[in-house]
Image (cartoon, grey):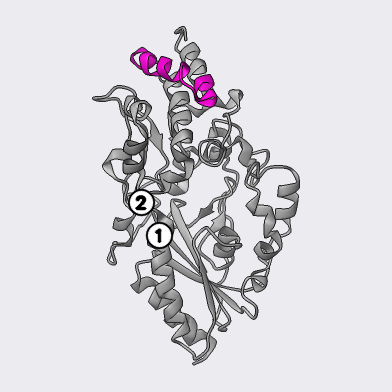
């Protein structure tokens, strides 16, 4: 089989496994890969030191899999079709928090990892001795840059991959292989003069279009950051308790009229669906959860990334922003607790509500 036929077989295997989009890129440094060093030098990675440790491999996939010739990039939509807002609702339980759409279901690392390994096996079966490596957001690969090079979309001004039919609520995965596969043509940038994502960011995390200062992004401060949330970023956090979707919610490419999400025939999207408990969790519940309750509720989800202490810290900030005085007793308990980090955030929240600690 020639490279074109091999590529078609790989694409067919990916679709059979439930991926919503698949493309192939050459295994070479993606465009603008050298910007990673500059981005790291600016300090935009914050405490995410692992990004620098294998920067050279991230820039050149041939250093990850020696002899690599092709990269298969796949995407799957993770939000529910027709759902255009993740705004927290008020209801029984009082003030509620918001969880980024990707995080409230089964951990995507586990679900997609399993499917990607199956895709890698399908690639290996095409020719004896074929080598592969597969990654879901865990290896030294610039997934978004690779996906763009493979024709799955373009990198938007909010630095996320945008697919012209699927939008940007996408999980990405890659399979590196030493098999020669016919590549796809890249998708041109369709952002034009739009700056909706840049203007809507609550923390001004974009110093320029296509550049993210992660240290100002709520997806960093509520998940990756282990210490105190910088005080200037607390009020802008609003009711978010894990991650943030604002720059995607305002993107014109994510409107129902523009999106065309295929049927979930292989059940992949269903396996990733948000659990009811995490659609709009009551802040009172989050503030009262003990370690066992938290572990049970977060089991099997990406929410574990923030750890229970981080969750409480985030919930305290959201409570302070809620305007709900009924949360004051729970805030006082944390303000008087032994954990200095949580106590300081609780005192901030009480002051924000106009209550004494």
| Residue shown at the point (57%, 84%) measured from the top left | 180
Looking at the image, residue 106 sits to the left or right of residue 37; the answer is left
Looking at the image, residue 96 sits to the left or right of residue 250; the answer is left
Residue 178 position, x and y percent, is 58, 81
**Looking at the image, residue 147 lies above or below residue 331:** below
Residue 71 position, x and y percent, is 56, 73
* Magenta span: 325-345
Residue 200 position, x and y percent, is 53, 33
Mark sitting on residue 197: none
| Residue shown at the point (46%, 81%) measured from the top left | 123
Judging by the rendered image, the residue that carries numbered circle 2 is 300
| Residue shown at the point (71%, 48%) measured from the top left | 40
**Picture quarter containing residue 239?**
top left
Looking at the image, residue 69 sits to the left or right of residue 135; the answer is right
Query: Are there few (<14), some (14-19), or many (20+) residues within 10 Å of tag 2?
Result: some
Judging by the rendered image, the residue that carries numbered circle 1 is 110
**Looking at the image, residue 232 lies above or below residue 325:** below
């Amino acid at each position: 089989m020639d490279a074109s036929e091999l590529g078609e077989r790989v694409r067919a295997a990916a679709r059979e496994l439930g991926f919503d989009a698949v493309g192939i890129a050459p295994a070479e440094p993606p465009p603008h890969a050298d910007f990673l060093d500059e981005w790291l030098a600016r300090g935009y990675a914050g405490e995410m030191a692992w990004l620098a440790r294998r920067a050279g491999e991230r820039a050149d996939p041939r250093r990850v899999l020696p002899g690599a010739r092709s990269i298969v990039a796949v995407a799957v939509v993770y939000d529910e079709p027709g759902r255009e807002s993740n705004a927290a609702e008020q209801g029984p339980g009082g003030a509620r928090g918001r969880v980024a759409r990707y995080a409230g279901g089964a951990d995507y690392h586990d679900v997609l990892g399993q499917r990607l390994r199956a895709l890698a096996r399908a690639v290996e079966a095409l020719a004896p001795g074929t080598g592969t490596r597969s990654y879901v957001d865990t290896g030294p690969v610039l997934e978004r840059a690779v996906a763009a090079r493979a024709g799955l979309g373009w990198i938007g001004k909010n630095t996320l991959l945008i697919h012209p039919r699927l939008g940007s609520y996408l999980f990405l995965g890659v399979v590196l292989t030493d098999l020669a596969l016919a590549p796809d043509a890249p998708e041109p940038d369709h952002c034009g003069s739009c700056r909706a994502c840049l203007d809507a960011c609550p923390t001004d995390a974009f110093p320029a279009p296509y550049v993210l200062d992660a240290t100002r992004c709520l997806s960093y401060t509520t998940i990756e950051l282990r210490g105190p949330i910088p005080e200037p970023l607390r009020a802008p956090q609003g009711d978010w308790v894990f991650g943030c979707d604002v720059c995607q919610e305002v993107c014109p490419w994510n409107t129902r009229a523009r999106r065309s999400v295929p049927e979930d025939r292989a059940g992949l999207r269903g396996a990733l669906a948000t659990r009811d408990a995490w659609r709009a969790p009551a802040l009172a519940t989050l503030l009262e959860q003990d370690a066992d309750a938290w572990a049970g509720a977060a089991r099997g989800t990406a929410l574990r990334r923030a750890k229970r202490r981080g969750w409480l810290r985030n919930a305290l900030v959201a409570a302070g922003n809620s305007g709900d005085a009924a949360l004051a007793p729970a805030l006082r308990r944390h303000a008087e607790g032994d954990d200095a980090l949580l106590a300081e955030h609780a005192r901030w929240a009480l002051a924000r509500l106009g209550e004494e600690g």
